[in-house]
Image (cartoon, rainbow, N blue to C red):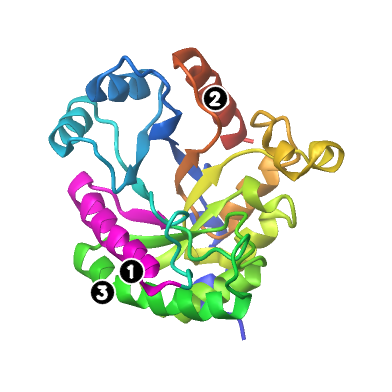
Amino acid sequence: MTDPANSPAPAASRPSRPMAKISLKWSMIEEDSLSILEKFQLVRDLGFDGVELDSPNDLPSREVLDARDRTGVAIPGLVNSMHWKSPLTDGDPAVRQACVASMITALDDAKLYGADTVLLVPGVVRNSPTSYKTAYTRALEEIAKITPHAEETGVSIALENVWNDFLLSPLEAAGFVDACNHPKVGWYFDVGNVLRYGRPVDWIEALGHRILKIDVKEYSLDKMNTEGPWKGFEVEIGDGDCDWPAVNRALAEIGYSGWASVEVPGGDRHRLAAIKERVDRIAVL
């Protein structure tokens, strides 16, 4: 039986541009001489709709909120800054608790900033003694400790697919979200990250309504095959193997219309302007 919640959106309701708003990551702004306000002004002047910050962070919250309000640049989501250093699936309970605590802080920060998601890597198996099966169980247990605070703050936990050797297939990822069994748990789909071992459209079809936000980056299978897996990312948006028209069609099919956050090597204002031009092109293909 078809899951009505994951059925294609009616044609009349499908968005013409699924990547409706474009953001970038705070770490991409490599203009160290600029104040927080000036960085927000730069983001606005380049035409970005928002910027995602890491959390926990050491940024003065009053300055961040002032910059947001004065520029109109939104903070749509935050990225947990501890999930690699202190993963939810670590063998040490203290390490797992550190990640849980960081998520509580990040959820509070998100509520303060007006963001509606916190990106979380659900677990790490790569270069870890933790087995896949154990990681799966631990991740579910630890996320269950965070969901009450997500409900309290009204901010969703957005799990992301990264090269962590965990949740490697789209059906498994969808099943994991469902196993969390909470309306405040969804998926932050990174388009470029899956090209190494799958097709983005298959992930979009399988995840469906579970997708809360999109990360945009490119990947080259030719560079992967000739120079190594990590070299695949060393290609500009639109010049790799991502079929962006197919991605947009697949997102439209599931009724997605929301944020797309660029996650590529940043730089100065000229570099960021070039990135914006590229993402604008692929967003309307």
The residue singled out by tag 1 in the image is: 97
Q: Nearer the viewer, residue 184 or 57?
A: 57
| Label 2 or label 1, whichever comes before in sequence order | 1
Whether label 2 touches label 3, CB < 8 Å: no
Write the start and end of the magenta stretch as one range.
92-119
Camera-near label (2 vs 1) is 1
**Label 3, residues with CA under 10 Å away: few <14, some 14-19, many ≥20:** some
Secondary structure beneath dot 1 equals helix
Identify the residue position indicated by label 3 in the image: 148
Residue 284 in sight here:
no
The answer to which of marks 3 and 1 sits earlier in the sequence is 1
Give above or below for 206 relative to 280: below
User: In screen coordinates, is 228 left or right of 7?
Assistant: right
Residue 233 drawn in magenta: no
Contact (Cβ within 8 Å) of mark 2 with mark 1: no
Above or below, 257 against 272 in this view is below
In front of the other: 246 or 132: 132
Q: Secondary structure at mark 3?
A: helix
Q: Amino acid at mark 2?
A: Ile
Three-letter code for the amino acid on which mark 1 is drawn: Gln
Q: CA distance from mark 2 to mark 1?
A: 37 Å
Residue tagged 2: 275
Prevailing secondary structure class for the magenta stretch in the rendered image: helix
Q: Residue furthest bottom?
A: 1
- Residue 113 in percent (x, y) is at 22, 45
Please state, as top left, top right, bottom left or bottom right, where the N terminus lies in the image.
bottom right
Q: Say few, some or many: other residues with alpha carbon within 10 Å of mark 1 (under 14 / 14 to 19 / 20 or more).
A: some
